[in-house]
Amino acid sequence: MNLHIIYTAAAVLISKKRYESWQGVQDEYPDYRASLGPWSIKETEEYLDDEYQKIYPSASEQLRGFAKSSNTVHIVSFSQI
């Protein structure tokens, strides 16, 4: 499974959708800021762990649940503390 990390003005998202280029992502999200990928689940997990100390639940837990779900997009959650 290849994933894209999508940054919008409001959230950090992970998507299972296939995109030909970042322009395809931009077309889908009006408040698009940037995107990364496609990456494997492992690469995505490592990036999220490295970049976000306040990710909660852990990147591993969020990605495991997302991979098992039928959803195509997941909003990354963070600790509010």
Image (tube, rainbow, N blue to C red):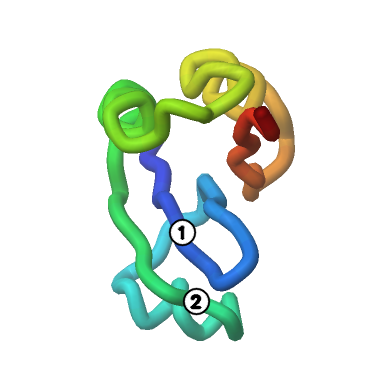
The C terminus lies in quadrant:
top right
Q: Residues within 10 Å of mark 1 (few under 14, many from 20)?
A: many
Residue 57's x, y, as percent?
62, 19
Residue 23's x, y, as percent?
36, 82
Q: Disc 2 vs disc 1: Cβ atoms closer than 8 Å?
A: yes
Residue 45's x, y, as percent?
37, 25
**In this rendering, position of residue 14 left or right of residue 21:** right
Q: Residue at x 65, y 20 (%)?
A: 65
Determine the image quadrant of residue 40. Answer: top left
Q: Marks 2 and 1, how far apart in space?
A: 8 Å
Vertical arrangement, residue 15 with respect to residue 10, above or below: above
Determine the image quadrant of residue 62. Answer: top right
| Lower position in the chain sequence, tag 2 or tag 1 | 1
Name the residue at the front extreme.
Answer: 81
Residue under label 2:
32
Question: Which disc number belongs to residue 6?
Answer: 1
Name the kind of residue labelled 1 in the image.
Ile
The N terminus lies in quadrant:
top left
State the residue in front, 61 or 54. Answer: 54
Q: Provide the secondary structure element on which disc 1 rests.
A: strand
Q: Provide the secondary structure element on which disc 2 rests.
A: strand
Vertical arrangement, residue 34 with respect to residue 24, above or below: above
Q: Residue at x 53, y 53 (%)?
A: 12
Residue 32's x, y, as percent?
50, 76
Name the kind of residue labelled 2 in the image.
Tyr
